[in-house]
Amino acid sequence: MELKTKIHAEDGKQEIFITREFDLPLELLFKAYSEAELIEQWMGNKVLKLENKQHGGYEFQITNPQGDVVFKAHGAIHEFIPNQKIIRTFQMENTPFPAQLEYIQFEKLTDETSKITIHTIYQSVDYRDQMLKLPFAQGINMAHNRLQEIVNPLK
């Protein structure tokens, strides 16, 4: 089955582009990326901190049934313009991956559809290539499918 979320990674570059069109109005797509309750539902993370403003920050984590932290990520928000863009850093804790920079653009296609483009820049081509060897594409596609499913009833 073809993945709806597309990842474009040009050889020899330390960046990727992630794009996805949603059957959601622009405002709802943006809410899914900016409201803690919705983020927790579609990403499966606990939102420990979310300061949607310039110089703000965020922190997400996932625990297993025993309560052990199995994933934790955090970052700084550099720009936050509702329904347009979020520019932030993203760093996973307890991994060899350094912080990456994410430019998240939101675009209205019609009154009922919208598109997201995420331009991610890694510290090196090697780190980018290591990330792409993980089940990254399937994971983000599954998360975006859940986003569509969870936010759809809010239309």
Image: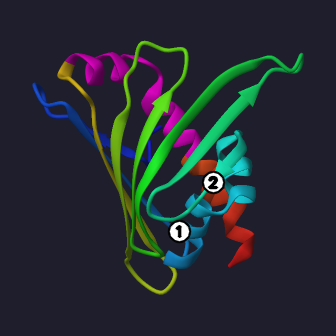
Q: Residue at x 58, y 47 (%)?
A: 58
Q: Position of residue 65 (x, y in %)?
A: 88, 21
Q: Where is residue 9 in the image (x, y as percent from the top left)?
A: 22, 34
- Residue 2: tell me if it is visible: no
Between 60 and 2, the residue placed more toward the observer is: 60
Q: Which mark is residue 127?
A: none
Q: Name the residue under label 2.
A: 50
Query: Local crowd at mark 1 within 10 Å, few (<14), some, or many (≥20)?
Result: many
Toward the bottom, the furthest residue is: 111
| Span highlighted in magenta in the image | 126-143
Q: Which residue is drawn at 19% across and 22% down?
A: 125
Classify mark 1: helix, strand or loop: helix
Disc 2 residue type (three-letter): Leu
Between 38 and 25, the residue placed more toward the observer is: 38
57 relative to 50 in the view: left or right: left
Q: Position of residue 16 (x, y in %)?
A: 26, 39
Whether residue 25 appears in magenta in the rendering, the answer is no
Q: Which residue is drawn at 13% across and 31% down?
A: 13
Classify mark 2: helix, strand or loop: strand
Between 10 and 60, the residue placed more toward the observer is: 60
Above-or-below relation of 79 to 99: below
Q: Name the residue under label 1.
A: 30
Which image quarter: residue 37?
A: bottom right
13 relative to 130 in the view: left or right: left
Query: Local crowd at mark 2 within 10 Å, few (<14), some, or many (≥20)?
Result: some
